[in-house]
Amino acid sequence: MGIFDDCEPDQRFSSSPFDVYRHGSSSKWMVHDWDQRRVISVETSWNEEDKDFIFEALNLHIDDVPPDTTLIEVSASGDLIRCTSDIYEDAGKVPFFKYYTNVGNIAVVWHELNCLMRIPPHPNIVPFNSLVVDAVDGDDKVVGFTTPFVAGGTVQDNISRVFGMKHLKQLLQVIDYLNLKLGIVHGDISPYNLLIDPETDEIKIFDFNLGSKLGWEGDAENHNVFGYEADRNDVKMAVFTVYEIITRDMHFREENYPNELDVSMVLGIDAWQKHTSVNLDDGVDVVEYRQVLEAWVKSRKETDTKITQWTEAETPIDWPPLPEYPLVPVTGAMRRHSFQYRLEMIKYGRQFLRWQRPASCQLPLPPGQLLLATGQVIDDHGQIIDAYGPTVDDKGPDDAKRPSSSSSSESGLVDELVETERDQNVEVVGSSGG
């Protein structure tokens, strides 16, 4: 999840070695709080080396300090010495996509979004649904996108649901459609990226963030993202996926990198042992599933020698490159930058997207209050109850320059959140820039 990539589902905080600053004999840790979607610094009067101590100390106080707190100082026993809302201690970054900050992920989301919205409607692909747009400084900015919800959980999670022969054939056919007709490689075919629609009983593939154009070297301006990796080709990954669905044996992919995987690892097994909880079609043996799979693998070996580049596909899809980054204030000057610091935006009186939200311990909200996707809490009349952080609408640049230790949140305007309906002709221009 961006800056929270290293967080487990039950883990609240994360911090990297690059987020620790030493000042003589003291230290300052920049900690990312997944629960409230904010960054808060933890300062000690000594050079603390133990990340667990920092997390434990922060956990003692995070839900009690004001929501606009930017830094706390703790003692050697973890007691709170002071907290401040000084904007000059604000180490947070302004998110661009998907409600979280990951500077290196902007280009990935750009290509994933553009790819998905250009894939024609297909019964076995979860489609692009809408853009999430927010107005910043008078301009509509794309901050994310949505897809329709499919109930029932993934094929990996819902083990008791029947995985029929028709689902296997649909999976293989949709891979052919993506690879050979559109020139698109999903790149992460796996049980956790497959759904079975309870209304249509059709398999559906989703999540193209590891996708690519077949044979493409990738976006050269952005670390070659969305570039094709032969080791993640969909044929190989489909073989392991079908094996995992039937046997529930995940150890091959858990213990090996994609470049270490070879289909012979599973196709070389004489007999696949169906897991006792797995349900296949009545009267259809595992051997028949393997016969269909292996016949497809054999046919793709011949086809894949003829189509090696996305441009050779029947009707390849393409999209514009990532637009130039916008001009934003960075260390006293306007620069084209891939992200914005909250400090700079507040200091210069700029509007920006706020995704901070109340702590879980404050939920559910009392009757008459509503939590927006932006993290703001409003009442029945649309008035902000808690804006969770300094708001530039009420604080001009001169005010912002004055350090503050206020313990109360500033109020602000309700950011309008708009979902733009699906439109095949929509071209997202400039959506990378917050």
Image (spheres, helix red, strand yellow):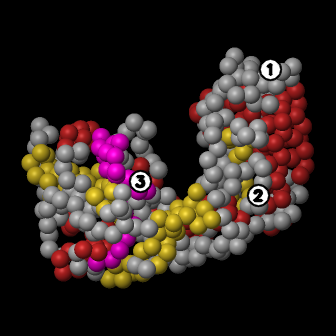
Q: Can you tell which mark lies on residue 271?
A: 1
- Which residue is at a point 63% across and 30% down the rendered structure image? 158
- Which residue is at a point 86% across and 63% down the rendered structure image? 314
Label 2 vs label 3: CA separation? 33 Å
Front-most of 334 and 68?
A: 68
- Which residue is at a point 30% across and 55% down the rendered structure image? 39
Q: Mark 3 falls on what kind of element?
A: helix
Residue 355 colored magenta? yes
Relative vertical location of residue 89 with respect to residue 56 in this rendering, above or below: below
Q: Mark 2 falls on what kind of element?
A: loop
**Comparing labels 2 and 3, the label whose residue is closer to the camera:** 2
Residue 332: x, y in percent?
28, 80
The quadrant in which residue 178 appears is: bottom right
In this image, 157 relative to 139: left or right?
right
- Label 3 sits on residue: 3
Q: Can you tell which mark lies on residue 121?
A: 2
Which of the two discs, 2 and 1, labels the residue nearer the N terminus? 2
Residue 420 colored magenta? no
Front-most of 397 and 235?
A: 397
Residue type (three-letter) at the residue carrying disc 3? Ile
Residue 375 in sight here: no
Magenta segment: 349-373
